[in-house]
Image: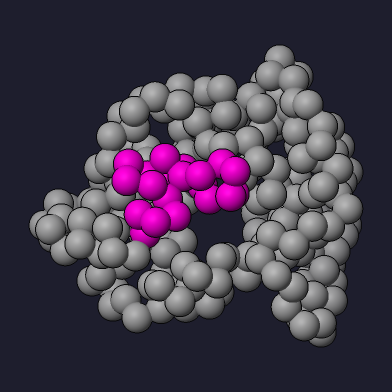
Amino acid sequence: MLSRHFLGFLLAALGGSLALAGTPPEPWNAPYAEKTAALSLKGDIARGAAAFEICQGCHRAGALGRADGSYPRLAGQHANVLVKQMADVRSGRRSNLKMLPFADHQALSVQDIADIAAYLQSLPVPPTQGQGTGTDLARGRQLYESDCQVCHGKQGQGKADQFFPRISGQHYAYLLREGGLIRDGKRHNAHPDMVLAIGKYSDEDTAAVSDYISRLPVGGR
């Protein structure tokens, strides 16, 4: 049986999603009060390390994630990308019922969000991420260079000033899952240009480009 505490989180998440569903879609990364507030704050790495302790059960020590794709690697990610994703989960713009109890207002303050983001950005990214089979890397490279590189960069380093995430060092299985969700229109805070770019991909294409990305050099922070 669900606890009353978790049921409250669940209803809040569903309520936020339903409210958003009844309104016209807003531009990607449109400003809203809590995200703007978190982005305006200076994050403290030491405080962020302490606040991140509640997240380590899923994202692991050092924010290295899990190679099976159940949880992403967050180490070395751009701080503003992390702020956006945490704020989007809290607001219902991104549905993530597993994360919501740990990121909701009763768990984290706006300052905590800024602190955790600063801490995660500071972490090193070792070249130990999960990879695919390596059987169709030529196709994966072709797709990446034609459709993904313009936003995520030649080495998957992302573009912090445009809120495009770093994807080098990410686990193959997570890239594969999220790529499928974005392609199928099931990740509601995805950039519309990305949805359009990969909307034509087959399952084999999605696997090939995810495998190629998982092998990009991590190249530091």
Q: Would residue 155 appear left or right of 47 to someone viewing this image? A: left
- Picture coordinates of residue 144, whole percent (x, y): 29, 59
Visible residue check, residue 57: no
Give the residue drawn at x 42%, y 64%.
179
Give the residue drawn at x 42%, y 40%.
157
Please identify the dominant SS of the magenta region. Answer: loop
Q: Would residue 47 appear left or right of 200 to someone viewing this image? A: right
> Does the segment drawn in magenta span residue 155?
yes
Q: Is residue 16 above or below residue 164?
A: below
Image quadrant containing the N terminus: bottom right
- Picture coordinates of residue 57, whole percent (x, y): 59, 34
Give the residue drawn at x 70%, y 70%.
27
Q: Is residue 66 above or below residue 60?
A: below
Kindly indicate the quadrant of the structure image that contains residue 142. bottom left
- Picture coordinates of residue 207, whole percent (x, y): 27, 63
Visible residue check, residue 76: yes
Pick the residue in front: 9 or 137. Answer: 137
Pick the residue in front: 167 or 145. Answer: 145
Kindly indicate the quadrant of the structure image that contains residue 218. top left
Q: Would residue 182 appear left or right of 198 to someone viewing this image? A: right
Task: Provide the residue span drawn in magenta.
Answer: 148-167
